[in-house]
Amino acid sequence: MKAEQIKREAEEIKEAVIADRRYLHAHAETGFDLKETVAYVKKELQKMGYEPKECGRAGLVALAGGKKPGKVFLIRGDMDALPIKEESGVDFASENGCMHACGHDMHTAMLLGAARILKQHEEEIEGTVKLMFQPAEEIFEGSSDMIGAGLLTNPEVDAALMIHVMAGMPFPAGTVVVSAPGVSAPAADYFEIKVKGKGCHGSMPNTGIDPLTAAAHILIALQEIHARELAMSDQAVLTIGTMNAGTAANAIPDVVVMGGSIRTFDEDTRGFIKQRMTEIAEGIAKSFRAEAEVTFGSGCPTLVNDSALSACADQYVKELLGAGCAFSVAELNALGGNSQSSKSAGSEDFAYVSQEVPSIMLALAAGQPDKGYMYPQHHPMVKFDEEALANGSAVYAYTALRWLEEHK
């Protein structure tokens, strides 16, 4: 498969991909509630000649190729937005209180672009490309939901790829960074700590049990896990983001509810922190005559990049875009004088796929700060450079085609 041809075809459909992106951006939806998004993606795939199948609560799967025997390569695009009121100022801004502030509209549009390219080469595909359109990435539930619904079977997936656009990268739009082998995104866990006391009048605290005092001591004590119970090499972050209690300044409430998240790069560290959180919260609450209940909600494991697939992706992307527009993490570190491999602090629920099949995550530069793209992901004013879209579509398609070609 000639790289020049795929790159040219991606440029030829650039306007269609931009149109897809702008529709999806203007109709941002969250979680599994993607009625308009899924309907649009399904309609566009059907227009191309695909037969998209529903997968899980709000996912879609389509198959390209299958005319020749071979392996199956999966490419993923997530579709959900965030519950953020948009302030970007773009002409196609969402007005429904939700916003594609993480760039998932870019991912979905690029995957639709790849679908167009792959359709033109369907007779040549040495196996099958499985297109995964995923919901609920932001709440870390969509990928596991689709896997539970049979995503990785019928036909069975042999390898997988995801791309994530990045705002604020100091590289021209369309530059690709290939993740190094190993963990590149941490496991994530959301939690809630409910501290139960006994409400009373603020002038008579001795008649009640103050859950606020207990909660304050719990909050401070949890930071000791990182400071005194983890080694320097145990990278982790524990954050309390919310603390809610009471409605009156002269009353002690019955309950305090704290919410937060944990990020870890190691499953043993992840389990240890969760265990100690529960022990600390329950123990401190008891010392203040209160009770504490720790509940862990949605989350995802670490995202692991396969060594062989990382090397393949690095080779293919450079064939397609040229060495000046594609880098491995090691090359970037060498350029910056940093010998250590870089990791993202943001979690990614494609991790569930990476735990099942060899996988790779690519970063796609989509907005240089000095060109006006200065706001970070998840900010109400973030914007993404649409010049990255053509390269994204080409990378999706070309990587899948080349991997299948080399792994007959």
Image: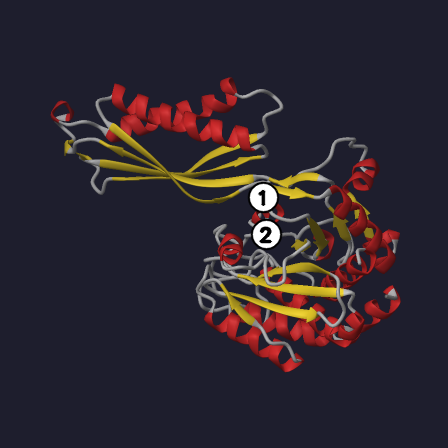
Is 360 placed above or below 78 here?
A: above
Q: Is residue 119 left or right of residue 141?
A: right
Query: Which residue occupies 14% across, 22% down?
Result: 206
Query: Which residue occupies 51% across, 52% down?
Result: 144
Is 272 placed above or below 241 here?
A: above
Q: Quadrant of the C terminus?
A: bottom right
Amino acid type for the residue under numbered disc 1 = Gly
Is 350 placed above or below 14 here?
A: above
Query: Which residue occupies 85% across, 54% down?
Result: 318
Q: Is residue 228 left or right of residue 282?
A: right
Q: Are discs 2 and 1 less than 8 Å apart at CB?
A: yes
SS assignment at label 2: loop
Count of labels in the image: 2
Residue position for label 1: 346
Residue 133: x and y, percent?
58, 64
Front residue of 52 and 174? 52
Residue position for label 2: 377
Residue 158: x and y, percent?
68, 54
Q: Write down the quadrant of residue 74 in the picture.
A: bottom right
SS assignment at label 1: loop
Tell me which colouring the rendered structure shows: secondary structure
Residue 134: x and y, percent?
55, 61
The crowding category of the residue bearing disc 1, from other C-alpha atoms within 10 Å (few below 14, some 14 to 19, many at least 20), is few
Q: Is residue 27 left or right of residue 245?
A: right
**Earlier sequence position, callout 2 versus callout 1:** 1
The crowding category of the residue bearing disc 2, from other C-alpha atoms within 10 Å (few below 14, some 14 to 19, many at least 20), is some
Front residue of 6 and 391? 6
